Each structure stands twice: as structure tokens, then as C-alpha cells.
Image (tube, rainbow, N blue to C red):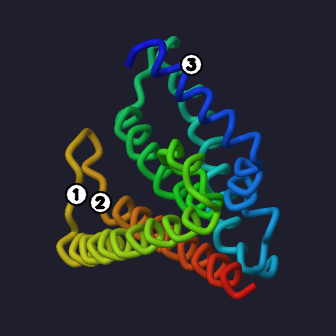
Amino acid sequence: MSSEEKKHLGQQLEQAAESGMGHEIQELENPEADQHLPGRGNSPLRFLQSLDGLLIIALSLFITVVVLLRVAGIGVTGAVELGAMSMVVLVALGIPAVTRADENFRLEIIDFFVSAKTLSRLDAIGLAIQLVVTCAVWLFSVDLFINDVRTQTTMGGEKSLSRYWLTGAVAVGFAGVLYALIQRSIVLIKKWGK
């Protein structure tokens, strides 16, 4: 892209922001500004977030203790394995809160070139796609969890831990994502009703 094209694009973005379109976009993206759901509606997501926070604290303490023990010449069997699995659980339990806040990765460059109504429609299409994909992933993770419980599948590593607690956390995480997407759908439908 030439410097002249960049300058032209910058001017277009400034004009869109000056026309007030940026404010409308910010309103659409701020879930706290138009929270239509009762406070209890977010309780499962808050619980997963709290559990995630406790796991971060536990993981931090565990890693600190393991490092201190290694300095003292005492190795802890399975420490790397437990740390790696904890990271998977952290991500799985953190995704629902990010989804509910609509803070997941998205390309917002088109937002400045369309009206608020078109943007709302595009958000609805994106939300429908997210619901379908998340439902499929959740069903797959539940199936994998059930299979792991039935077959007592273990993970490789020093401890050979059962895999079902890990796949169970992933299934719970994606159930939380579905819940958050349904909440966002309700908010969007209520916006359209106004």
C-alpha cells in the first residue's frame, strides 16, 4: 500500500469517526452499557472466571514451590506435565468470560464503513456462525469426555494421569461459551425489538 493510499484510508477513518459512527459502534460493543440480562444471568460465567483465577494462583504457587525444590536439588515428578495441563484448563475456563464480553479476536476495519444497522446484522451473522461452530465443538468435547471416562484413557508423561479431567474441563468451558453466546444473542434480539 503506497503512502498516498494509507493517507486516503486514514482520512476515511477520521471522517467516519467524526460523523459519529464510531460512537454507535462503541455502543454495540460495550455489553455493560446495555446489559439486558439480570445479574444472576452471569453467575455461571462469574463462577468459571473465579475458578480460573484460583487456578492461576494455585499454578503460580505450585511453580514457585517446584522451582525452589529444584534449587534445593529435589525434583518433582510430573511438574511440567501438571503445569502444561493446567494451562489448557486455564484457557478452557477463561474463554466463556471473553466470549460474553465480546472481547474475542475480530477484524473491525469494516465497522467504520457500514451503518450501525448493517453492523448489527453482520454481528448477528457472526454470532450465528459462532453458535453453530461452538455447539459442534462442545458436542465433540462431551463425546470425548464420555469416551475418556469409559475407556480410562491416560495421557503420556511421567504421571500417566487420566485424561477425563482435562477433557471434562474443556467440555465445561465450551458449555460456558455456548451459554455466553446465547446471552449475547438475547441482548441482540432485545436491541432489535427496540
Q: Contact, CB < 8 Å: mark 2 with mark 1?
A: yes
Q: Which mark is residue 162?
A: 2
For disc 1, the marked residue is: 154
Secondary element at image label 1: loop
Q: Earlier in the sequence, mark 2 or mark 1?
A: 1
Q: Contact, CB < 8 Å: mark 1 with mark 3?
A: no
Placement of the C terminus among the 4 image quadrants: bottom right
Picture residue at 26% right of the left edge, 72% below the top:
140
Picture residue at 73% right of the left edge, 57% below the top:
24
What percent of the width, then of the height, locates residue 131?
42, 74
Observer-nearest of 161 and 101 = 101
Observer-nearest of 154 and 24 = 24
Picture residue at 48% right of the left edge, 15% below the top:
4
Picture residue at 82% right of the left edge, 63% below the top:
33
Q: How many marks?
A: 3
Q: Residues within 10 Å of mark 3 (few under 14, many from 20)?
A: few
